[in-house]
Amino acid sequence: MKLAYTLGLAGCLFFSCISATGQGPTAAMSSEQEIRALENERNKAILSGDAATLEGMTSDDYTFITLRGELRTKSEIVKGFQSGSFKYDSRTISDLNVRVYGDTAIVTGRAIQKGSERGKDYSGDYRFTRVYVKQKGRWMTVALQTTRIQP
């Protein structure tokens, strides 16, 4: 009985120390790792058409400049995925370079994708720059610019 009490007390103290020092699994993740994880989560949401996830990770004032120079807002993107008019069959991201400047992060990378938006083919090989800002303790994407890589 004494041993069980001692082990229980030791466990409580251990987890209290981890919590108090902020060394839990999430706190130990660097900002760069958080952004990389968000990029992967975003890619999965795009592939599955998960508008709710995309909406939750995107700031209300988000702007996206497409490869055709079109300007899109958060609302337009979310509605496109909700309605099914934005559909991606495949999309692979690579070459991620994450730079963090305080509460701002810039990601450059490459996406190879097959899909369409509003009946227009958006398949191809692209480079992109995405900007994140930490708002209320969460990283939110605020801007994206894409450029098609010419064969």
Image (tube, grey):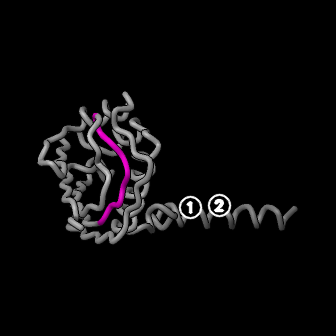
Q: Which residue is mark 1?
A: 16
Range covered by the magenta-colored residues: 110-118
Mark 2: give few (<14), some (14-19) or many (20+) Cα within 10 Å: few
Furthest residue in direction top, as rendered? 83
- Which mark is drawn over residue 12? 2
- Which mark is drawn over residue 138? none
Image position, residue 137 (x, y; %) = 32, 51
Which quarter shows the N terminus?
bottom right
Residue 105 visible in the snapshot:
no
Residue 2 visible in the snapshot:
yes
Image position, residue 16 (x, y; %) = 56, 61
Image position, residue 135 (x, y; %) = 26, 49
Q: Is residue 135 above or below residue 149?
A: above
Marks 2 and 1 close (CB-CB < 8 Å): yes
Q: Secondary structure at mark 2?
A: helix
Q: Residue at x 29, y 39 (%)?
A: 117
Image position, residue 126 (x, y; %) = 26, 61
Which quarter shows the C terminus?
bottom left
